[in-house]
Amino acid sequence: MSTERDLVQKFATYAESRRYTRRQIVRAGAALGLSATAVNSVLAMPAFAQDSAASPAADGPVMVPIVGAEMSFDDIKAAIAEEGEVNVGNWTYSANDALIKRFQDYIKDVYDVDIKLNYSGSQTPSTYITDLTIAVGAGDNAPYDVLAIEENYWAEAQAQAAEAGAPMMEDFLPSPLVPNADRVLETLIHAPTSVGFQASASPGITINTDNVDYVTDWDDLADERLKGKLLMWLPGDITGGGICWAPRLRSGWTTKIPRRWTRRSPSWSRRSIPTCSSTPTSSLNWKSC
């Protein structure tokens, strides 16, 4: 028993030093052969425990950088009630309604305030940057309070702000109101304006099996019978980039692209990674991808 306790303590110390998430703790604990009881004891430790009913200001006033002032629990509660709603721009998900409900329930549970979350979902996040640029240029208020989109859009907003000589994002980090930011890898934090989140997307092939029965792998997309019949994402879209990387990865990261690709796609060098320049509504041109 003492051996397991020692292992649990060492594991907890290591997990805290590496800023493990609760999910990572569960996975790593299982890999180490720790019992469910042992893993739960780590999750219950102050460094990893989550108290969804507690406000960061529960023990006294905290400095809130975005307003440049200390705020007590009552101050934060009053500010939320006065604001009344929050506008968020993000990718569109089938779980939109659940995300909205969870956020509104959290605010109600912690601060006993009803708030409305206006969730704007889009499959082309670049439109958010366009809306933001137009608003800033016109001297209007930003149409969104929070944008949860990819890092490249953050970089684009930074570049446009520098060009326009007007900030497009608020400085809000580090903030006690965003405590979980401390658990994110430093390389993903762009303080004071942004904190990253880790996610992954798996590009796939969608085919009409009534007409095509010979596509079983990425290599089959080079079949001459599909010439002029493939659609791609908008250039710059990360999913479109993933589609172009997939055949390369499929053939082996350190290996050459199969001859099948280079023979039928003359512009694809076996020494280079392919890029796409087709549009979402146009047929894929083998000379452009």
Image: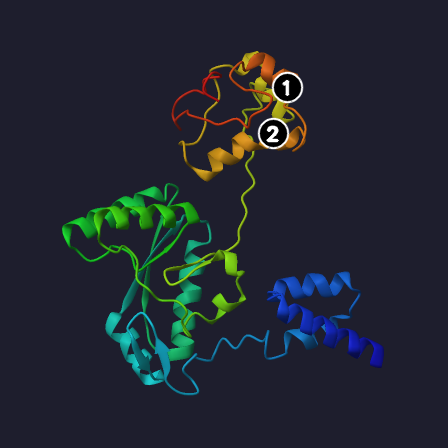
Q: Badge 1: how crowded within 10 Å, few (<14), some, or many (20+)?
A: few
Q: Say which label, 1 or 2, has the lower sequence index.
A: 1
Q: Which mark is residue 248?
A: 2
Up-down relation of residue 86 to residue 3 (above or below): above
Q: Which residue is mark 1?
A: 214
Confirm whether residue 1 shows in the render: no
Q: Is residue 12 left or right of residue 111?
A: right
Q: Position of residue 280 (x, y in %)?
A: 40, 28
Residue type (three-letter) at the residue carrying disc 1: Tyr
Q: Position of residue 43 (x, y in %)?
A: 64, 73
Residue nearest the observer in this picture, 162 or 14: 162
Residue type (three-letter) at the residue carrying disc 2: Arg
Q: Is residue 278 left or right of residue 183?
A: left
Q: Is residue 86 left or right of residue 32?
A: left
Confirm whether residue 96 shows in the render: yes
Which quarter of the figure is the N terminus placed in? bottom right
Up-down relation of residue 284 to residue 66 (above or below): above
Q: Position of residue 246 (x, y in %)?
A: 58, 32
Res 252 quadrant in image: top right
Query: What is the distance, in whole Å, between disc 1 and disc 2 at their CAs?
Result: 20 Å
Mark 2, secondary structure of its residue: helix
Q: Nearer the viewer, mark 1 or mark 2?
A: 2
Res 24 quadrant in image: bottom right
Q: Position of residue 145 (x, y in %)?
A: 30, 60
Res 255 quadrant in image: top right
Up-down relation of residue 42 to residue 24 (above or below): below
| Residue drawn where x is 56% and y is 40% of the image | 202
Q: Is residue 288 left or right of residue 201?
A: left
The image shows a total of numbered marks equal to 2
Q: Which mark is residue 228?
A: none
| Residue drawn where x is 16% and y is 55% of the image | 140
